[in-house]
Image (cartoon, grey):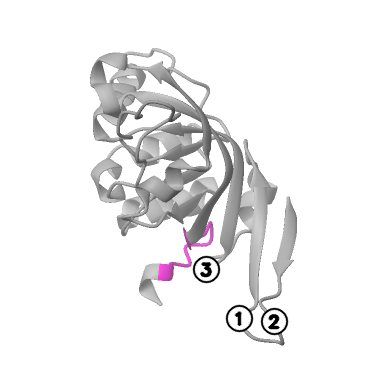
Amino acid sequence: MSRLYYDEGEGKNHMDTIKIETPIDDSVVSALKAGDMVSISGTIYTGRDAAHKRMQECIAKGQLLPFDIKNQIIYYVGPCPPKPGQIIGSAGPTTSGRVDAYTPELLDRGLKGMIGKGMRSEQVVQSMIKNKAVYFAAVGGAGALISKSIKKADVCAYPDLGPEAIYRLQVEDFVVVVAIDCMGNNLYER
């Protein structure tokens, strides 16, 4: 992990951006604080409520998850189909609370990061503290802009779910904000 510094000029509007590459481990997660601006590069996975329900069914049946979740980041998104010449269509975040019921189980299995929008339940926050994980907020309504940071997209699991399938995304400089850090500091409560 490296820290970059952008000077907007003459001591005003300073902005630090922390660049991270996936997968992430405890040392990266521990360094991130609520309010930090982060640029993510590497592989992330998508998943909305239908995909999370299927993953929970896998766990209940004693089956393996469709990808190794340890140290990974899941982005809560159901991307639009790409137009000709695009890698992916608009890819804005969905409301994270929709997957709160499934999240602690995935955090117990090694998930380290989540990207979405909106508050998380107290159970999720407590599980994040216990498992040392981080919750990033992406900008809602900026799906077309976010899609420009996605360099490759392929379906990883559950293709019958259409846009709610699990996609493996290769991202470059995917900009997010740490909404809740691994100590439970919560940007939404400031």
Q: Identity of the amino acid at label 3?
A: Gly
Residue 119 position by quadrant: bottom left
Q: Give the magenta part as a residue range.
A: 179-187
Residue closer to the observer: 65 or 150: 150
Question: Disc 2 designates what residue?
Answer: 9
Question: Disc 3 designates what residue?
Answer: 35
Q: Identity of the amino acid at label 1?
A: Asn
Q: In this rendering, would 178 be left or right of 9?
A: left
Question: Disc 1 designates what residue?
Answer: 13
Q: Which numbered disc, 1 or 3, marks the residue that appears first in the sequence? A: 1
Q: Is mark 1 on a helix, strand or loop?
A: loop
Residue 180 appears in the rendering = no
In reply to whether residue 167 is colored magenta, the answer given is: no
Q: Which numbered disc, 3 or 2, marks the residue that appears first in the sequence? A: 2
Residue 54 position by quadrant: top left
State the separation of the CA atoms marked 1 and 2: 7 Å
Residue drawn at x 38%, y 41% is: 104
Q: Do the residues labelled 1 and 2 touch (CB within 8 Å)?
A: yes
* Residue 190 percent coordinates (x, y): 41, 77
Magenta: main secondary structure: loop
Residue drawn at x 32%, y 23% is: 165
Q: Is mark 2 on a helix, strand or loop?
A: loop
Residue closer to the observer: 85 or 102: 85
Q: Identity of the amino acid at label 2?
A: Gly
